[in-house]
Amino acid sequence: MAEEIKIDQSKNVVVGSGNRVVQKFTEIYHALGKKQFIVLCIAILLVLLAYVFGTKHLASKQDLVYASVDDVEDELAELVQKNIATADQVGRVKKDLLDTFSKGIESLKSENYGEAIRIFEELSKSARLASIHNNIGYAYAKAGNNNKAMVNFQIASSLQTKFTDSVENAKILYEHGVPPSPILGAQVVNFTSEVHYAKATAILDGEPNEGWMSDWSYVGRHVEFPEAFVIELPGEFLITQFSFDNAGVERLDATTKDVDIYVSLETKDLGYEKIASFTLMKGEIAQGFKLNSPVRARWIKLKILSNYGNTLYVTLGEFRIIGLPWSK
């Protein structure tokens, strides 16, 4: 008969012949014998201990990093070097910027992450620096909002400055199961056709009510497949998935149906390899397609192979490329 044991005066645990775990261990014990069973248990215990301590060690080696005041000064100097800002422009804002940034650092050190978020987000309105967005991400991560942390680490990475800690921070979050966000700063650098009121750039503009339409502006024009876009990313990325809005600019029968996707690490014109083919649903938004394994890319070519029957033109709403900044 099974025995009932009272624990904490609230929960009952039943042990006995009905306990499958105990039954399984009993079977193993009888099959191996006492000596081999003890050896097996010790081996399992060692594996568990190695995993626990190994995980803690890995976490200690891969802790998130926040930007320092020195990092901000380096970024400001880089703006001048790249002729993005003049020395006079930087000089006028530098002192106040560094003072405010220092206050944000103090909030991080005292673990007042809500105040740090407030300070750095306010600062980001007047200065678009990777170090600022990195620290917003750091504060959000420490406050437990990993999704907002990832977004800000990716914003910082997209700014393409010498400050690269945000790339590693995003990678750490990804390795701990936080999904990446759509890549910011991608640009359409080539395309086959467009009309003036629904341009090719609309597929990356983040506006759900706008989209692209192929050219049908002259008499007798019929849609010609494939239609294609070449998209340049703001650096090398590890692509994990794609998302499409396909609700239709005017008519649903003109929406995109079949697509192929290619990537290149060489140039916008050469070195493309096909990585995926998808069939989009008509009239649906936020259609996500996850790759079987992440793929490195600097340029992406999107080919539209068909629509849902319209003979004059084809349309596409939004195309989102989702992935992480590449780091070795």
Image: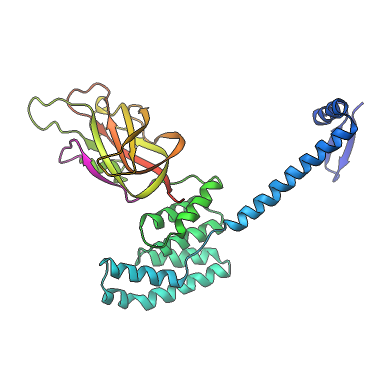
Left or right relative to 227: residue 175: right
On the image, the x and y values in percent for residue 100 come to: 43, 73
Measured as percent of width and height from the top left, residue 133 is found at 42, 60
Task: Return the x and y of residue 139 as percentages of the image width and height.
Answer: 51, 61
| Left or right for 20, reference 163 | right
Q: Is residue 321 above or below residue 167?
A: above
Q: Residue furthest top?
A: 309
Q: Look at the image and give the residue range highlighted in magenta.
A: 183-198
Place of residue 38 in the rendered image (x, y in percent of width and height, measured from the top left): 86, 37
The residue positioned 40% from the left and 67% from the top of the image is: 123
Of the 4 image quadrants, the one containing the N terminus is top right
Q: How many numbered marks are there? A: 0
Residue 149 appearing in the image: no
Q: Which is nearer the eye, 226 or 16?
A: 226
The image's colour scheme reads: rainbow
Tell me which secondary structure the magenta stretch mostly adopts: loop
- Residue 264 visible in the picture: yes
Q: Residue at x 73, y 44 (%)?
A: 48
| Residue 9 shown in magenta | no
Whether the magenta-drawn stretch holds residue 191 is answered as: yes
Q: Residue at x 25, y 72 (%)?
A: 86
Q: Residue furthest left?
A: 219
